[in-house]
Image (cartoon, helix red, strand yellow):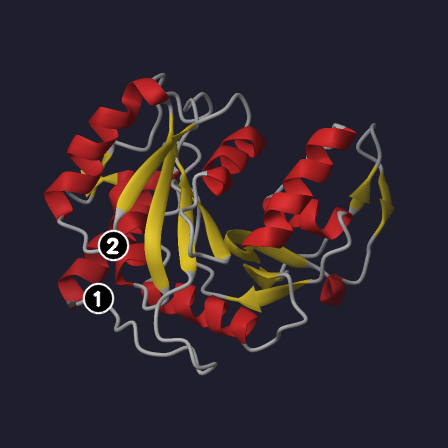
């Protein structure tokens, strides 16, 4: 059952968050020329799992799926229509790079939304609860421009030179591994994208664009199982976990 769009605790009663699900990858590392977003995972297309999570999230009122224009109807037919999502789903065309695709998705956010939740379509294990928790963290602090889902680093980190020689071991306590969703105030995201285009800057994630622009971002801890399907071996773990969730329902 979908979460209830009740109240943000700030006097507003309608959702202000639009999800942007980036599903425009070419699948080169995965080894599937047609991309990996529509491969069958636990009985349904990979990308449909995260679409379901955003559909059930209490604060999300719209979903924009970013994919290649030539795959739009296939994406709609296989990953959207069969699941009767109650949240409106629209599309934007993927660009040449992920940053271009994200920019296109952000530009396609309808009027009336002031927060965007950007998510990799290849992260099917995200949950509605994690999405809502991260959004609440942002809503609770008006001085924040956005929040990034992730976890404190648990592995020892090394600084390594070009020849592989270890140059240092930084304190692990200062480092996080981050994923998506990255939930950012829409105005800050749009201004950060425009500044990046003007400067020719390419960030490693959406948060890095806002950080460079002077925005204030915060990490929010979420489950470590929010992994990204990058290579075929990742499917074994993801499929097992999704099947376990289905069994537990």
Number of other residues with Cα within 10 Å of mark 2, as a class: few under 14, some 14 to 19, many 20 or more: some
SS assignment at label 2: loop
The foreground one among 47 and 91 is 91
**Compared to 55, does 201 lie above or below?**
above
* Residue 203 visible, this angle: no
Residue 91 visible in image: yes
Q: Quote the CA–CA distance across marks 2 and 1.
A: 9 Å
Q: Residue at x 45, y 47 (%)?
A: 119
Residue at point 29% right, 22% down?
Answer: 71
Q: Are marks 2 and 1 in contact (CB under 8 Å)?
A: yes
Q: Position of residue 3 (x, y in %)?
A: 26, 70
The residue identified by callout 1 is 2
Q: Is residue 96 above or below residue 186?
A: above
The quarter in which the C terminus is drawn is bottom left
Decide which of 42, 209 is in the foreground and name it: 209
Instruction: Looking at the image, tell me whether mark 2 or mark 1 is earlier in sequence order.
Output: 1
């Amino acid at each position: 059952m979908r979460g209830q769009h009740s109240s943000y605790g700030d006097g507003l009663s309608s959702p202000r968050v639009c999800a942007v699900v980036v599903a425009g990858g070419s699948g080169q590392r995965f080894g599937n020329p047609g991309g990996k977003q529509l491969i069958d995972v636990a009985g349904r297309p990979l990308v449909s799992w995260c679409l379901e999570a955003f559909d059930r999230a209490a604060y999300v009122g719209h979903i924009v799926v970013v994919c290649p224009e030539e795959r739009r109807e296939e994406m709609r037919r296989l990953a959207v229509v069969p699941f009767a999502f109650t949240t409106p789903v629209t599309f934007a065309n993927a660009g040449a790079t992920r940053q271009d695709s994200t920019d296109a998705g952000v530009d396609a956010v309808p009027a009336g939304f002031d927060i965007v939740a950007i998510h990799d379509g290849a992260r099917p294990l995200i949950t509605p609860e994690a999405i809502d928790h991260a959004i609440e963290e942002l809503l609770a602090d008006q001085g924040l421009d956005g929040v990034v889902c992730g976890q404190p680093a648990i592995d020892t980190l090394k600084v390594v030179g070009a020849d592989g020689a270890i140059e240092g071991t930084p304190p692990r306590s200062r480092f996080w591994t981050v994923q998506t969703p990255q939930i950012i105030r829409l105005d800050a995201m749009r201004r950060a994208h425009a500044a990046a285009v003007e400067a020719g800057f390419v960030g490693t994630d959406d948060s890095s664009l806002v950080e460079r622009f002077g925005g204030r971002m915060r990490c929010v801890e979420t489950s470590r199982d929010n992994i990204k399907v990058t290579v075929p071996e990742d499917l074994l773990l993801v499929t097992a976990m999704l099947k376990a969730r289905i069994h537990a329902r």
